[in-house]
Every structure is written in structure tokens, then in C-alpha cells.
């Protein structure tokens, strides 16, 4: 066991935890003032709900002994056998508990990401039930497929820190959710203006900060690979923040603060699967393309007329997809000998492998989410009433107001 690695993983876990309330700020500033507390609640309550689910069941489903390449067994149910000594397979220089805690924070933030799509129109009770079921039946198996020795890992798919597990999964599920739920009242007929963009900018900044734990921490050791992941993460975010506002400037005539924040997040999403497999110069290209891809993706909702309130599909779904495919292009064993060479380093097969992982992730998460929504809606109606939507979620769901007149 290595003390430096242990400290690094624990700090990284804390940074990833910080990202979830930061996401609440990022989302909270973009909704109307009558929904700010409801939106903040979605991100913050997930910390409690999914942390308990992960400790009792989720970690074992994701990282227990492989069952047919699909899910982990119950080896670690209730954290049985997860203690202060390293595990021979997972992060073997840090306590097993430290690795479990680090992975817990990924499980926490992923369903919180989905909440941006259906903001301003969901019952809180339905949100809790959906998030619990989604974590158990979508996130846990997918994490096993990619990181726990499941079939995508056996296929050779590369996902350094969650392009499929976190971002494509949330994007695909967000699309299923908004198609199931329908549009907000008067969507497209009246402007839905963000009520507090400084809050959104602050949230984006904290997300950027926390993302270093997300990506660099996924190296699982305090060494050269973590340094590479740190640098590639920062450069991709920087590049995407610029390419987004340039695209926006050319398209709409003005660069916006919301565009700058969204672009930075888009770059962070795009580099996530590739962070520990590509060079710093490749990360700049991934970020530049990612900013434009996600800007176009966000605008697709107007073309196809679906109400993705806070652009989860465009940023996380398409950003994660681009990042996964870009890994197939730019990955090199010179950065990570446990990875693979991509197309630009003589191995076209990796692009096909990454494409399979993209299709499998989107299909599994989209269809699975629709099934879960059907079950939840039969138990407790998912969408709030029109009267509650008009009043706002803060009052109708929580009996509070974010601001005093």
C-alpha cells in the first residue's frame, strides 16, 4: 500500500463529490427563479440517496465477480470484504475502501446530470424513485461492463474516466426522459430566461476544479499518468470554451457568458474518456471539436422540438460520444501502455471498438430508461400537475422560496 496514492485518491474522491453540488449551482442558475431550490435539491439529495445505494448494493454490482460479462456478483454486498487493505484487482496500492469511495462519487453525480433535462416539471417523489432504480439497473451494470471486467472491457473499449459510464449514459437517458415527459408549459411560446447566470458561471468554475479529481484521479496512482490526465483535462476545457463562443459568435452575433461556461463543460465531457490515453496536443483538438459539436448538438433540440431544459443531451450525450470516438482516433500506448493505439497511431480497429461501445451505451440507457419511467409512472405520476408547474417546484414540491421579494 502506498501512502501517496492513498492520499491522492481520497483527495480526488472529495473533488468529485464537490462536483455534484457544483452541478446544482450550474443548473440552478439556468432555470427560472421559482425553480431554483427544486433544481438545487435534485443534485444535493442524490448525494445521500446514491451513496447509501452504492455502499449496500451498487459497488458489488459494478465491481463484484463477473457474471456473464453483464453484472458483478454479490461479493461486496454491504461492503463485505471491502476494508483497509488493497484489492488485488482494483487500485492495488490503496485501501479497498478508498477505491470504493472514489467510485461512489461517480455513481452519485451521474443521475444528477440527467436532472437538467427534465428541470422545472417533475415531482420530487418520482425523481427519487427514478434515480434509485436508474442507479441500480442502469448505472451499476454499465459500470461493470466498462470498469468491472464486463463485456465492453473484454472487447477492449477504452473509457478512462466515464465517457460512456457517466456522460453518454446520462445523455441517452435524458433524451428518453424528455421524450417521455413532454415539454414544459408554454415552451417555445414564451422565453425561458436563466435567472442567475453568475450562479451558473460559479458552478462551471467549481466543476472545472473538481474535474481534475474526476479525470486525474482515475489514474489511481499519484504519478505520471495522473499528470497527463490533469493537463489534457485542462487543455480540452480551455479549447472547448473558446471554440463554443466562436461558433456562437458566428451563429448568433454575440459571445455569451452562458456559452463560455457551457463550452468549458463540453470540453471536460469530451476529454473524460480520453484523458489518460492521449497527448496534450491531441486533447486540444478534442476540445476544439468538442465545443463545436456540443454547440451544434444543443441547437438540435430546436430543430427536433424536444425540451431538454438544460442541454444534457447536447453537452453530455454528444460530448461523451465525440470523446469516445476521439479516443479511438488519438489514443496511444506512448501515454498509457495499458491502453491501445488508435487510428492515428496505426490501429483502425480501436475506432470500431469505440463505436460499438457508443451504440451499446446509447441503446441500453435509452431503452432501459423508458422501461424504468413506465414503472415509476405507474407507481407515482412522474410529471407534476400544471398548477404546480405554474407555481414552481420550490413552492409546490418543497414549500420554500429561493428569494424573498
Image (cartoon, rainbow, N blue to C red):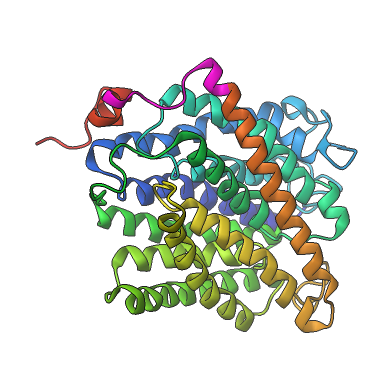
Is the residue 397 above or below the residue 229 in the image? Answer: above
Q: Where, quadrant-wise, is the C terminus in this rendering?
A: top left
Residue 223 appears in the figure: no
- Which residue is outermost to the top? 379
- Which residue is outermost to the left? 405
Does 370 appear in magenta? no
Q: Nearer the viewer, residue 221 or 132?
A: 132
Q: Position of residue 274 (x, y in %)?
A: 67, 67
Q: Position of residue 120 (x, y in %)?
A: 34, 37
Report which quarter residue 290 is drawn in: bottom right
Is the residue 377 above or below the residue 281 in the image? Answer: above
Residue 270 appears in the figure: yes
Left or right of residue 220, residue 45 in this image: left
Q: Nearer the viewer, residue 312 or 386?
A: 386
Q: Residue at horizontal 54%, vertical 56%?
A: 316
Q: Nearer the viewer, residue 9 or 299?
A: 299
Left or right of residue 246, residue 32 in this image: left
Is the residue 45 above or below the residue 288 in the image? Answer: above
Q: Which residues are magenta?
A: 376-387
Q: Position of residue 343 (x, y in %)?
A: 78, 79
Left or right of residue 127, residue 216 in this image: right
Q: Position of residue 103 (x, y in %)?
A: 66, 45
Is the residue 351 above or below the residue 120 in the image? Answer: below
Q: Residue at horizontal 41%, vertical 25%?
A: 123
- Which residue is outermost to the right? 68
Does 378 appear in magenta? yes
Report which quarter residue 279 is drawn in: bottom right
Q: Nearer the viewer, residue 375 or 132?
A: 375
Amino acid at each position: 500500500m502506498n501512502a501517496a496514492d492513498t492520499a491522492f485518491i481520497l483527495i480526488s474522491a472529495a473533488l468529485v463529490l464537490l462536483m455534484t453540488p457544483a452541478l446544482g449551482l450550474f443548473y440552478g442558475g439556468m432555470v427560472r427563479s421559482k425553480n431554483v431550490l427544486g433544481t438545487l435539491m435534485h443534485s444535493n439529495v442524490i448525494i445521500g440517496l446514491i451513496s447509501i445505494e452504492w455502499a449496500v448494493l451498487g459497488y458489488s454490482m459494478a465491481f463484484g465477480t463477473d457474471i456473464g460479462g453483464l453484472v458483478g456478483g454479490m461479493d461486496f454486498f454491504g461492503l463485505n470484504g471491502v476494508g483497509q487493505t488493497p484489492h488485488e484487482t482494483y487500485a492495488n496500492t490503496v485501501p479497498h475502501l478508498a477505491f470504493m469511495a472514489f467510485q461512489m462519487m461517480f455513481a452519485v453525480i451521474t443521475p444528477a446530470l440527467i436532472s437538467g433535462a427534465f428541470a422545472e416539471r417533475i415531482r420530487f417523489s418520482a425523481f427519487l424513485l427514478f434515480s434509485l432504480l436508474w442507479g441500480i439497473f442502469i448505472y451499476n451494470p454499465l459500470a461493470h461492463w466498462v470498469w468491472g471486467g464486463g463485456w465492453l472491457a473484454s472487447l477492449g473499449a477504452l473509457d478512462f474516466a466515464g465517457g460512456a459510464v457517466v456522460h453518454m449514459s446520462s445523455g441517452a437517458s435524458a433524451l428518453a426522459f424528455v421524450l417521455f415527459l413532454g415539454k414544459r408549459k408554454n415552451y417555445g411560446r414564451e422565453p425561458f430566461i436563466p435567472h442567475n447566470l453568475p450562479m451558473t458561471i460559479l458552478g462551471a468554475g467549481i466543476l472545472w476544479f473538481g474535474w481534475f479529481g474526476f479525470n486525474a484521479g482515475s489514474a489511481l496512482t499519484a504519478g505520471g499518468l495522473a499528470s497527463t490526465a490533469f493537463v489534457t483535462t485542462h487543455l480540452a476545457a480551455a479549447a472547448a470554451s473558446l471554440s463554443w463562443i466562436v461558433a456562437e459568435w458566428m451563429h448568433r452575433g454575440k459571445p455569451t457568458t452562458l456559452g463560455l461556461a457551457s463550452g468549458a463543460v463540453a470540453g471536460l465531457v469530451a476529454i473524460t474518456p480520453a484523458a489518460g490515453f492521449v497527448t496534450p496536443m491531441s486533447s486540444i483538438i478534442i476540445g476544439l471539436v468538442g465545443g463545436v459539436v456540443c454547440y451544434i448538438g444543443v441547437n438540435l433540440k430546436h430543430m427536433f422540438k424536444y425540451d431538454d431544459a438544460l442541454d444534457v443531451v447536447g453537452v453530455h450525450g454528444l460530448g461523451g460520444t465525440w470523446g469516445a470516438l476521439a479516443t479511438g482516433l488519438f489514443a496511444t500506448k506512448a501515454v498509457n501502455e495499458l491502453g491501445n493505439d488508435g487510428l492515428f497511431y496505426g490501429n483502425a480497429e480501436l475506432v470500431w471498438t469505440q463505436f460499438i461501445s457508443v451504440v451499446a451505451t446509447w441503446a441500453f440507457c435509452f431503452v432501459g430508461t423508458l422501461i424504468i419511467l413506465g414503472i415509476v409512472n405507474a407507481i407515482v405520476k412522474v410529471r407534476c400537475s400544471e398548477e404546480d408547474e405554474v407555481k414552481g417546484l420550490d413552492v409546490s414540491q418543497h414549500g420554500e422560496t429561493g428569494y424573498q421579494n
